[in-house]
Amino acid sequence: LQTSEVVRIGEHKPILVDVRIIAATHADLKKAAVWKTFREDLFYRLNVFPISIPPLRDRPEDIMLLSSHFLNRYSLVMKKQGVRFSKEAEAAMKNYPWPGNVRELENVIERAVNLAENNRILPDNLGLENVGLSKRRLTGSRLVELEKKVILETLEVYDFNFSKSSEVLGISRATLYNKMKKYRLQADRQPV
């Protein structure tokens, strides 16, 4: 990547190549490089022009747009013309958190087109779990899990130095101890 050259196995003469790398991941590669779970030099070679695409749950306006696209695609593939979403199915899709993002949405629509009777997709055809939960409850539980994860990861990065970790987290050391107690989190080492 650095020199734009490759050497075939068994040969000694480099071949010039014109390469542009496009890579996608859901992982935070910058953190992974800091934690030494991803090569730092490779991160900086790949991180020329980063494009962040928010998860589907943060783009509710795209849910029905993408759903209509997939509905048209799978209606054609399965030769089922005129398949439509019921109002209840649309509401279920809009309220679902889509942890599997667009891939999950596409699979759900393909399943629904297969199961639709009378050219109408009902909520039962979608097979979505926890549709009845409110977005507020889902968001709250996600925030708690995220806060726990951030606290533990920060402690690990700073070798369980509570003073430095609380400074980085933007909270007092006492607040950090209280959150550890509240979430029943155990430090792998004695606090520093």
Image (cartoon, grey):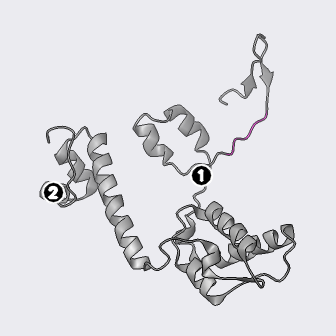
Q: Quadrant of the N terminus?
A: top right
Which label is found at residue 66? Answer: none
Q: Is residue 82 left or right of residue 162?
A: right
What residue do we see at 75% from left, 70% from top? 114
Camera-nearest residue between 167 and 135: 135
Q: Between marks 1 and 2, how big is the CA–CA gap?
A: 38 Å
Q: Is residue 161 left or right of residue 57?
A: left
Q: Amino acid at mark 1?
A: Pro
Q: Quadrant of residue 6?
A: top right
In the displayed structure, 4 sits above or below 105; it is above
Residue at the left extreme, as displayed:
174
In the displayed structure, 184 sits above or below 9; it is below
Whole-percent x and y of residue 167?
Answer: 22, 52
Query: Quick one: SS at disc 2?
Result: helix
Whole-percent x and y of residue 14?
Answer: 77, 18
Q: Amino acid at mark 2?
A: Lys
Q: Mark 1, residues whose alpha carbon is within 10 Å: few (<14), some, or many (≥20)?
A: few
Q: Which residue is mark 2?
A: 181
Whole-percent x and y of residue 184?
Answer: 20, 55
What residue do we see at 14% from left, 59% from top? 178
Camera-nearest residue between 114 and 141: 114
Which label is found at residue 50? Answer: 1
Q: Is residue 61 visible?
A: no
Indicate whether residue 141 is drawn in magenta. Answer: no
Q: Which residues are magenta?
A: 18-22
Front label number (1 vs 2): 2
Q: Quadrant of the C terminus?
A: top left
Indicate whether residue 20 is drawn in magenta. Answer: yes
The answer to whether marks 1 and 2 mark residues whose Cβ atoms lie closer than 8 Å is no
Residue at the bottom extreme, as displayed:
87
Camera-nearest residue between 44 and 39: 39
Q: Mark 2, residues whose alpha carbon is within 10 Å: few (<14), some, or many (≥20)?
A: few
